[in-house]
Image (cartoon, rainbow, N blue to C red):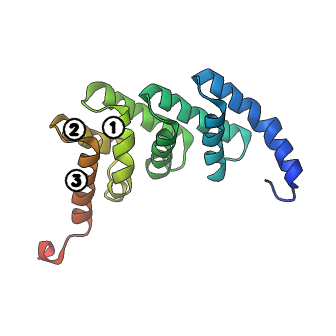
């Protein structure tokens, strides 16, 4: 709730502002309204507490969930990781990155579900090493093409990046 707002005032504002938007998103993407409400609540907890921002992020997650045939909670984590790690907390930049990742998925042996599972496992290390989301997804896709599972590829890449970023004393010699 906003500063100085009572519980009943806050509840009325949420009911008036958010419920119609949540209902519209639920209908547009064929989702159960209570699940869409949970996604909206997640974004509100992250600070997207205005109707416009919250609606944009909830809609983006819903779109990618439908596109990738993914669970909304997994999609929320995926979009959140891309948004915070590679998108510099910028909605339009995040949309562009997600579009690039979709392009990789279309031409490589990796699907959006695999990317959504794998990328959060290694995103922080990849970003620290200077990799873009596109480079990370391409690396994972190449490993998946060679028969390595997406999460195994992410784990292997994560440890490789950690070792290169902070080599052991013996490797430094």
Q: Indicate the quadrant where residue 134 lies.
A: top left
The foreground one among 7 and 168 is 7
Locate residue 87, reporting x and y percent: 48, 46
Label 3 vs 1, first from the N-terminus? 1
| Residue at mark 1 | 114
For image coordinates 35% across by 39% down, the residue present is: 115
Q: Looking at the image, can residue 47 be seen?
A: no
Q: Are marks 2 and 1 in contact (CB under 8 Å)?
A: yes
User: Dot 1, how many residues are within 10 Å of its Cα: few (below 14), some (14-19), or many (20+)?
Assistant: many
Chain-order first, disc 3 or disc 2: 2
- Kindly report the distance in space between the C-alpha atoms of the residues bearing marks 2 and 1: 9 Å
Q: Which mark is residue 71?
A: none
Mark 3 to mark 1 CA distance (whole Å):
15 Å
Q: Which residue is mark 3?
A: 156
Disc 3 and disc 2 in contact, CB within 8 angstroms: no
Which of 155/106 is in front? 155
Quick one: SS at disc 1?
A: helix
Residue 146 x %, y %: 15, 37
* Local secondary structure at mark 2: helix
Mark 2, residue position:
144
Image point (65%, 45%), residue name: 41
Picture quadrant of residue 145: top left
Does any portion of residue 78 appear in the rendered image? Answer: yes
Q: Quadrant of residue 162?
A: bottom left
User: Is 28 positioned to the left or the right of 119 in the image?
Assistant: right
């Amino acid at each position: 709730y906003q500063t100085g707002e009572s519980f009943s005032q806050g509840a009325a504002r949420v009911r008036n502002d958010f419920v119609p938007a949540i209902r519209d998103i639920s209908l547009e993407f064929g989702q159960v309204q209570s699940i869409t409400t949970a996604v909206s609540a997640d974004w509100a907890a992250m600070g997207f507490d205005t109707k416009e921002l919250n609606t944009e992020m909830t809609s983006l997650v819903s779109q990618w969930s439908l596109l990738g045939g993914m669970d909304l909670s997994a999609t929320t984590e995926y979009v959140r990781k891309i948004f915070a790690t590679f998108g510099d907390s910028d909605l339009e930049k995040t949309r562009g990155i997600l579009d690039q990742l979709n392009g990789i998925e279309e031409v490589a042996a990796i699907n959006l579900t695999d990317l959504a599972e794998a990328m959060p496992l290694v995103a922080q290390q990849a970003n620290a090493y200077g990799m873009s989301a596109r480079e990370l997804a391409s690396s994972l896709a190449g490993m998946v093409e060679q028969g390595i599972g997406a999460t195994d590829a992410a784990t292997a890449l994560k440890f490789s990046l950690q070792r290169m970023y902070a080599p052991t004393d013996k490797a430094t010699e």
